[in-house]
Amino acid sequence: MTEENKKEVEAFKEKVNEFIEKETVENSVKDNKVEFIYNDIKYRVNRATFEQKMDMTSKRIKKYTELLKDSDQLLERDLIEIYKKRGIDIKEIEKKINIFEKEKTVLLIKLGEALKENKEEPYLENLREEVAKIYERQQDLDIEKNILLQNSIEMQVNVYTYTYLAYLVTEKFSEDNWIKAWNSYEDFIKEQETLVNKVVWHSTLLTRIDE
C-alpha cells in the first residue's frame, strides 16, 4: 500500500467509524424508515418500494451501458491488470480478505460456544479482541481494494445506484406534510456532502435489511 493510499484508508475509516458510532441500526430504523433532523429540516428515509427498486434497476442498466460505451472508462478486470503491471496485486488482496474472513468465522464460532459454556470473562474478552483485530485488518484491505477500484465502471455504477435510490426514497417535512425532499436527482447531488452521505447511508442500511 502506498503512503497516499494509507492516508486515504485512514481518512475513510475515521469517517465511517464516526458515523457508525452516532447512527446505529437499533436506534435508527423504526417501522421501515429512518427520521433525522439536518439544519432544522426533518428528513425521512423510507424503505424502497418495488416500483422504486425497478426504477433504480432501470437507471443502473442505463448508467452501466453509458459508461461501457465510453472508451476512456475501464472495467474492474482492466484496472486489475494495469495495477498488476505496476506491482499491485488486487487478486492477492482479495485472497487475504477471504483468509481473514475464514479466521474471523472460526473465532466467532469459538466465541459462541464459549458463551454457551459460560466461560470466564477474561477468556471471552480475549476472543473478542482477536475478532476485533482481524476485523480491523480485513477492513483495511477492503478499503484499500475499494480505493484502488473506485474509478472502475462497476464501482461508479454502484455509487450511482445507491445515490439514486437514496434520492428516490427520501422525504422532508414541510407545512405539516411529508413531501419529496428534492425535485430532481441533480438537485440532490448538489446538496451538502454531509447530508448526501447521511441519506445514502440510511437508504443503504434499509436496503440491506430488506435483503
Image: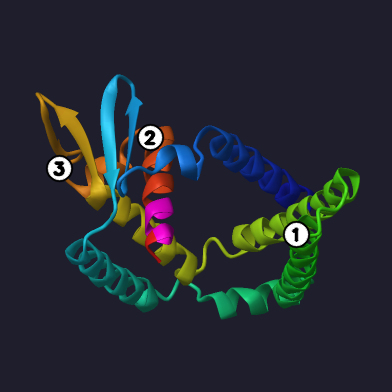
**Measured Cα–Cα span from mark 3 to mark 2:** 16 Å
Residue beneath the point at 54% across and 61% down: 150
**Magenta span covers which residues?**
204-209
**Measured Cα–Cα span from mark 1 to mark 2:** 43 Å
User: Is the magenta region chiefly helix, strand or loop?
Assistant: helix
The spot of residue 171 in percent (x, y) is: 21, 40
Q: Is residue 80 magenta?
A: no
Q: Amino acid at mark 2?
A: Leu
Q: Against 50, is 48 above or below?
A: above
Q: Amino acid at mark 1?
A: Lys
Mark 3 and mark 2 lie on one chain; the one further toward the N terminus is 3
Q: Nearest the camera: 79 or 121? A: 121
Q: Against 144, is 90 above or below?
A: below
Image quarter for residue 178?
A: top left
Mark 3 and mark 1 lie on one chain; the one further toward the N terminus is 1
- Residue 1 at least partly seen: no
Residue beneath the point at 15% across and 42% down: 183
Counting labels gives 3
Mark 3 or 1, which is nearer the eye? 1
How crowded is the residue under tag 3: few (<14 C-alpha within 10 Å), some, or many (20+)?
few
Residue beneath the point at 23% across and 52% down: 168
The spot of residue 204 in percent (x, y) is: 41, 54
- Residue 168 at least partly seen: yes
The residue at which mark 1 appears reads as 116
The residue at which mark 3 appears reads as 183
Disc ID at residue 65: none
Q: Amino acid at mark 3?
A: Asn
**Measured Cα–Cα span from mark 3 to mark 1:** 53 Å
The residue at which mark 2 appears reads as 195
Image quarter for residue 207?
A: bottom left
The spot of residue 134 in percent (x, y) is: 79, 58
Secondary structure beneath label 2: helix
